[in-house]
Image (cartoon, grey):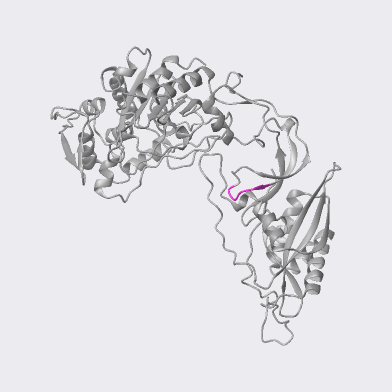
């Protein structure tokens, strides 16, 4: 793909010719506050456009208030967009309304989504505001391309300023090339693809009947999803600063072949089970519920469901405390720090971290070990041991190193990344994080990935579209820690807090419940994360109570279907 980076330019440095005390050296030309006359603005814009159209880009650059930036940008446009001919003609003064309408139509006027998960950071603008004395002029642009009779016509705008020597110059800005082009963005001719004719699951079956996917899949770009190069056309597009956002199509040079079905990673049978499970546990859509299922060996998202089905995409965009499902990561940190499942870890009835922390059971258990605390979900023990063995930032470091958090995920539709605060939290804030409260924010996508990483042994970034790049985690748990963590999750599924929903499931199973506290007076959120063979799930039911009450049954219903392919 050819890409022309169009740099922004301000007008702060207006010395266009070097000055010195030597009388033979020409004086510097600078922009003055006085606007050019109508005649001067017209002649200045015409001279610039004539030079650009003729291909004398150095001359065109010299007719601006930033020759170097203008020449570089115009040359990049010629080399990368590759028009075979340009026709540029002035069309008189431009109204403020016309300029505003042309620029506001650009997606760059609003924040750009990445489809990823994460959003690309906008370019930092260093350009100064346009000169107060500039006169806006309109022009007609027509670009021709070799090998096709198609011509690209558009309305352009440029500002003309008066210089200290009485001449006119075009005030350089990326928008001179095209009104939608903003600072830091790129303009290029690149392969383009037709929108998919429809979307199917991994077995080629239509996804049209799954209500939860209807709004979720609206986040998938309708065009320019890379496909077979033989099916591609060619077009002029604008890309965001990071080159990762949805391209803005400006003109189709050659049309792509008709779109083909887009095969997603979704499994129809698991999706049907997920939609029914969240609907059941949401009390018919009266409270929010969401579930995500992932294939641990590949990171492929096999199911994603929300209730209400057409409401907020909690599965991917939620950002709430995950409760004790976070103990999977805390336990991993304690195991990596030298503890074993048999290490003594007393469970008092209460402890303090700026506020009183309790368990879901009233009686103390001074005899408990790490295994007992994990399988019975003792908050107080995790807080006390976390304070003694861990420090602020340890969970964030492990989350980034092993579980892929901290780096934006490009899933295929918009998603919100997990938040585990780094070093710098006070002791009480850090203590709350050890049992999944405080400032930690998760969604079912993130917690399903945690279970998938434990089951698979290595992080596989979740994806919804085949072939998307998958961010890798820089490390993985030690074999000893991984074996012990799997044993803790297995014990929880067989005889701990997750045993109720997981009872009767065959195969290699593991799970963890979560009960997340909300604002005073609100019912707790129900969380559950688990795996069975090559299938990992996580579910959340807002106000659903304990993890075993609502999210657990929803997760188990999907695990029962299994990953049969």
Task: From the viewer's perspective, tell me whether residue 361 is left or right of residue 442.
Answer: left
Residue at the (36%, 20%) spot, across then down: 553
In the rendered image, residue 239 lying in the magenta stretch gets the answer yes
Instruction: Classify residue 161 by image quadrant.
Output: bottom right
- Whole-percent x and y of residue 54? 84, 60
Q: Is residue 391 visible?
A: no
Closer to us: 411 or 309: 309
Residue at the (17%, 32%) spot, across then down: 347
In the rendered image, residue 255 lying in the magenta stretch gets the answer no
Closer to us: 553 or 415: 553
Task: From the viewer's perspective, tell me whether residue 227 is left or right of residue 432.
Answer: right
Closer to us: 315 or 445: 315
Q: Quadrant of the N terminus?
A: top right
Magenta residues, as a range?
238-242
> Looking at the picture, does residue 232 appear above or below residue 27?
above
Task: From the viewer's perspective, tell me whether residue 228 is left or right of residue 436.
Answer: right
Instruction: Classify residue 201 by image quadrant.
Output: top right
Q: How many marks?
A: 0
Q: Is residue 223 visible?
A: yes
Q: Residue furthest right?
A: 149
- Whole-percent x and y of residue 432? 27, 41
Residue at the (74%, 75%) spot, across then down: 36
- Whole-percent x and y of residue 406? 43, 42
Is the magenta region chiefly helix, strand or loop? loop
- Whole-percent x and y of residue 512? 32, 26
């Amino acid at each position: 793909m050819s890409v022309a980076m169009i740099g922004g330019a301000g007008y702060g440095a207006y010395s266009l010719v070097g000055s010195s005390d030597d009388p033979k050296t020409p004086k510097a030309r600078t922009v003055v506050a006085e606007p050019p006359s109508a005649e001067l603005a017209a002649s200045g814009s015409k001279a610039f456009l004539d030079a650009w159209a003729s291909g004398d880009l150095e001359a065109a650059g010299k007719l601006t208030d930033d020759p170097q930036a203008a020449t570089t940008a115009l040359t990049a446009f010629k080399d990368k967009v590759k028009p075979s001919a340009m026709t540029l003609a002035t069309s008189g003064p431009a109204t403020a309304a016309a300029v505003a309408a042309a620029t506001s139509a650009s997606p760059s006027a609003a924040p750009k989504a990445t489809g990823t998960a994460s959003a690309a950071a906008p370019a930092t603008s260093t350009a100064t505001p346009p000169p107060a004395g500039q006169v806006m002029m309109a022009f007609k642009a027509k670009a021709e391309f070799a090998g096709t009779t198609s011509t690209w016509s558009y309305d352009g705008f440029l500002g003309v300023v008066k210089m200290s020597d009485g001449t006119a110059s075009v005030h350089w800005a990326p928008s001179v090339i095209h009104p939608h082009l903003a600072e830091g963005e790129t303009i290029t001719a690149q392969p383009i693809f037709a929108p998919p004719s429809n979307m199917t699951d991994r077995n080629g079956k239509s996804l049209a009947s799954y209500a939860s996917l209807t709004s979720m899949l609206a986040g998938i770009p309708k065009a320019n999803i890379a496909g077979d190069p033989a099916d591609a056309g060619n077009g002029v597009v604008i890309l965001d600063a990071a080159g990762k956002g949805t391209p803005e199509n400006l003109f189709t040079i050659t049309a792509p072949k008709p779109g083909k079905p887009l095969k997603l990673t979704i499994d129809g049978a698991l999706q049907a089970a997920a939609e029914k499970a969240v609907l059941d546990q949401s009390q018919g859509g009266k409270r929010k519920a969401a579930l995500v299922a992932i294939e641990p060996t590949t990171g492929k998202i096999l199911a994603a469901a929300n209730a209400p089905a057409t409401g907020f995409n909690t599965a991917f965009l939620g950002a709430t405390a995950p409760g004790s499902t976070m103990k999977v990561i805390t336990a991993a940190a304690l195991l990596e720090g030298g503890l074993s499942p048999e290490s003594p870890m007393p469970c008092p009835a209460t402890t303090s971290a700026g506020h009183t922390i309790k368990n879901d059971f009233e009686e103390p258990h001074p005899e408990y070990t790490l295994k007992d605390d994990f399988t019975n979900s003792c908050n107080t023990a995790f807080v006390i041991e976390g304070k003694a063995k861990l420090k602020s930032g340890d969970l964030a470091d492990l989350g980034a190193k092993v579980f892929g958090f901290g780096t934006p995920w490009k899933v295929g539709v918009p998603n919100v990344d997990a938040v585990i605060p780094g070093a710098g939290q006070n002791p009480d804030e850090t203590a709350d994080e050890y049992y999944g409260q405080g400032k930690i924010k998760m969604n079912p996508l993130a917690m399903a990935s945690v279970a998938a990483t434990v089951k698979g042994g290595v992080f596989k970034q979740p994806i919804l579209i085949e072939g998307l790049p998958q961010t890798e985690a820089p490390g993985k748990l030690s074999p000893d820690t991984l074996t012990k963590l799997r044993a803790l999750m297995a014990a929880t599924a067989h005889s701990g807090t997750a045993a109720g929903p997981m009872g009767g499931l065959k195969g290699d199973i593991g799970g963890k419940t979560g009960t997340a506290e909300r604002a005073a007076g609100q019912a707790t959120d129900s969380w559950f994360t688990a795996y069975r063979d090559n299938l990992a799930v996580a579910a959340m039911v807002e106000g659903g109570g304990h993890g075993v009450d609502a999210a657990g049954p929803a997760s188990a219903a999907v695990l029962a279907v299994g990953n049969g392919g």
